Image: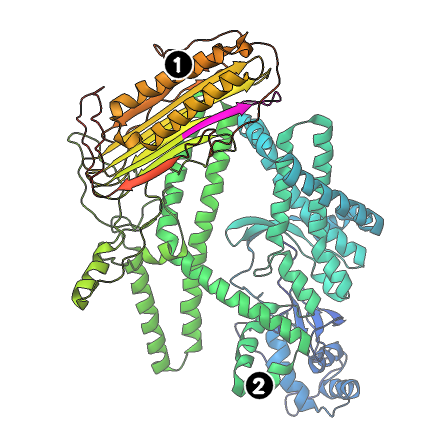
Amino acid sequence: MTQTHGGPPPEAGRPPSRVTVAQEPPGQTTTAGAHLPARADGVQLLGTAEGSGYREPPALVRRADGQTLQLTRLLYLVLEAADGTQDLEGIARHVSEGSGRLVSADNVRTLMDSQLLPMGVLRLADGSQPEVRKSNPLLGLRFRYIVSDPERTRRITAPFAVLFHPLLVVAVAAAFLASCWWVLMVKGLGSATHEAFEQPALLLLILAVTILSAGFHEFGHAAATRKGGATPGAMGAGLYLLWPAFFTDVTDSYRLGRGGRIRTDLGGLYFNAIVAVAIMGVWWATGFDALLLVVVTQILQMVRQLIPLVKYDGYHILADATGVPDLFQRIKPTLLGILPWRWGNPESKVLKPWARAVVTVWVLVTVPVLLFSMVMMVLSLPRLLATGWASVGKQQEMLLASLADGDVLGAAVRGVAIVIVAIPVLGLLYIVVRLLRQLVTGLWKKTRGKALQRTAAMTAVAVLLGGLAWAWWPDGGTYRPVQAYERGTLGDATRAILPVRERGELREGGTGQTVALWPAGATKPTRDNPQLSMVLVPVGAGAGGAAGAAGGTAAAAPAAPSWVFPFDRPAAPEADGNQALAVNTTDGSVAYSVAFALVWAEDGAPVTTANEAYAFANCSGCAAVAVGFQVVLVVGQTDVIVPENLSAAANYNCLDCLTYALASQLVLTLDGPLDGDSKQQLEALWLKIAEYGRNIRDVPLSEIQATLNGFKEQITAIVKGSPAADGTSVATTPPSAGPSGGPSSVPTSSSAPDGRPTVPAGAPAETFAPGPAATPVPTAPASQPAGGGQPTSSVDNATPAPTVGSGAGETVAPAPTTGG
């Protein structure tokens, strides 16, 4: 934090008793110098604020307790003349000359009586010092502890002022930006996090360096103050909001210009950058990745300090840039000035136009954010308390376990964790209690002497307290720790207090009630110990049906999804691939997909062709049949032969349905191109194979695999009979096939890196030694197999699908023929 005080408020509150300036008793003679107005001890006149955002810049005065006050020009002249040597008449003459306005002794008496005495800047009539009371804002620093007095602070921080030389500032800023980029975008934090948590000593070291760097941050503010010519004050620690914080009294910087004040505000951030650069140097020398976490903590500290909503460095930068020292004092005038009927009010025009615009934007952002944060804090307090209590309990168990094992460093880490958890929870309780106390006492004072208003105010407070009691009353889940499965959105926080009764509807991330069947004797899940389950949620079909029935006409049903299965659609085949994909979602129908392909590989290109057959069904009384047949002829020498032969058959939400997928593949390597006779034989055979594919619907499913194996034998015989057969290698990939009467997955086969297919046990496969390279033959695309035979797919809605029994390894019933 930059300052102990948020800025010079217009007044610091009135003392317990008011004392007027002494007048000469009638008929008595006043001795020289007796009963003359005089400033209180320790009051310093700082002069007019430079770079002010006010149309008429205020004058600044600092009391002995360090509180800085803003005074109008008239009040400042009165206080300036009240040096104990002039009476009221003399002070009036001084003020008249300085202000250019006629001021009488009675005017001076009124100003002292109503303004300066309550501020505690004048001695009382008997010459004693006034009782002063600092302003105590809700967002102020609490439980302050002075570590270094002003004299020691000035002595310690004086050498650091040289770090603000412009060349050093530019060099450090460039090194810091480069370090941030390298750590966050190049190196990363994975190894640093792992190393830190693997070694508790490093984690404690990081925490210690982070705390010390927070103290070094305050050195930056003090050194920047010295650099500008002002004098820093005491340094210490306290509690701000929910966390401990260091502070430095730099109220003397108000005597500086805008540039000096902003330098003071940025001094702490600059010293954070110095720490980050220094840590990068240490990492470079030692190689301990865990040290990089310190760089990240410096970045996080700087980001937090730049938040302008509360009194961090960002708030003071905004205040000093606009020349409005205490922005919170401008909240009420700014909000009132927005009202149209108050646009002409003088209070709305005390700021310069640009300063008023900036302050208005700040108020319109800060007030809603702080109010919303307070409301959410109050509503979430029970859950946060329960979570903190549970976390402390877990850390305590691990602390005791570490002590039992003799792990001192581990125990220290757990002890620090308990403190880190406990401090914000206790701070949260303190803020809530103090907020309620200020509300009650403030309303009580404002309604003094107004019985009706006090009754209404106290009634409203009672209603508020009753609502809080109802919201915080222990009721099952009110004080339940936050669980990992909860979303923690803003809507969830409000529903925790005002639950919304959803009409039997379950939604993702929500809570509700439903009926579930659980196995006897099984451990049932609870909120504290949930179990992973799948909940099927209707998609509102009933509502649409009801609406259609009521209207008497069939409402247009939403379009069915193109893919209804709980897995991704198979990817389209590659250029030399072959795929048969049969998908049936129509009740009482049969869907066929047949893909036959003859592929030639040449030029030593890698052979990675794939032959796939997929049959999926989501219907009732239906069937899906997919047959993929591929012949791959590799001409010449190639280094990579890794063909794939894949098939899958699956039913999803099916009743009385069949899926059958068969993938059959033959891979042959040739020393050279086929001769003319062999090529003609192969073309004639392929025409026969293509015709078979077109009429495969008329073939019983149990005969398809044997027929395709026969085609493979014929193709192999033709290739072997060719003069190019010397050294021919034959690899018969075993067919991948299987019928399914329920959800199933058909076994697949793959190839070894050397080009020989890897097959299941018992599958036929024969291999010949590969021959030397030869002239390749052009490759036929998979979607257009040589000799004809385009892959076909059809759905017959007139023919019912065959049924399959449940016995393992059954022969599939023949496919029905088409109706006439």
Q: Does residue 553 sit above or below 634 in this rendering?
A: below
Locate residue 315: give its quadrant: bottom right
Locate residue 617: give its quadrant: top left
Q: Is residue 786 left or right of residue 557?
A: right
Q: Is residue 495 left or right of residue 255?
A: left
Question: For the residue labelled by badge 1, is the local secondary structure a helix, a strand or a loop?
Answer: helix
From this viewpoint, is residue 23 visible?
A: no
Question: For the residue labelled by badge 2, is the local secondary structure a helix, a strand or a loop?
Answer: loop
Numbered tag placed on residue 163 in the rendering = none
Q: Does residue 180 sit above or below 635 in this rendering?
A: below
Numbered tag placed on residue 343 in the rendering = 2
What is the CA distance from the residue labelled 1 to the residue labelled 2? 98 Å
Q: Is residue 430 left or right of residue 641?
A: left
Q: Is residue 597 magenta?
A: yes
Three-letter code for the amino acid on which mark 2 is drawn: Trp
Which numbered disc flags the more N-terminal residue, 1 or 2? Answer: 2
State the residue at coordinates (28%, 50%).
511
State the residue at coordinates (70%, 31%).
283
The residue identified by callout 1 is 713
Q: Is residue 491 left or right of residue 156?
A: left
Three-letter code for the amino acid on which mark 1 is drawn: Glu
Residue 619: give x, y in percent of width and height: 24, 41
Which colour scheme appears in the figure? Answer: rainbow
Question: Which label lies toward us, 1 or 2?
Answer: 1
Residue 53: give x, y in percent of width and height: 70, 74
Residue closer to the observer: 554 or 283: 554
Q: Does residue 481 sit above or below 777 in this rendering?
A: below
From this viewpoint, is residue 429 visible?
A: yes
Q: Is residue 613 magenta?
A: no
Boundaries of the magenta span: 596-609
Locate residue 50: give its quadrant: bottom right
Residue 401: give x, y in percent of width and height: 41, 25
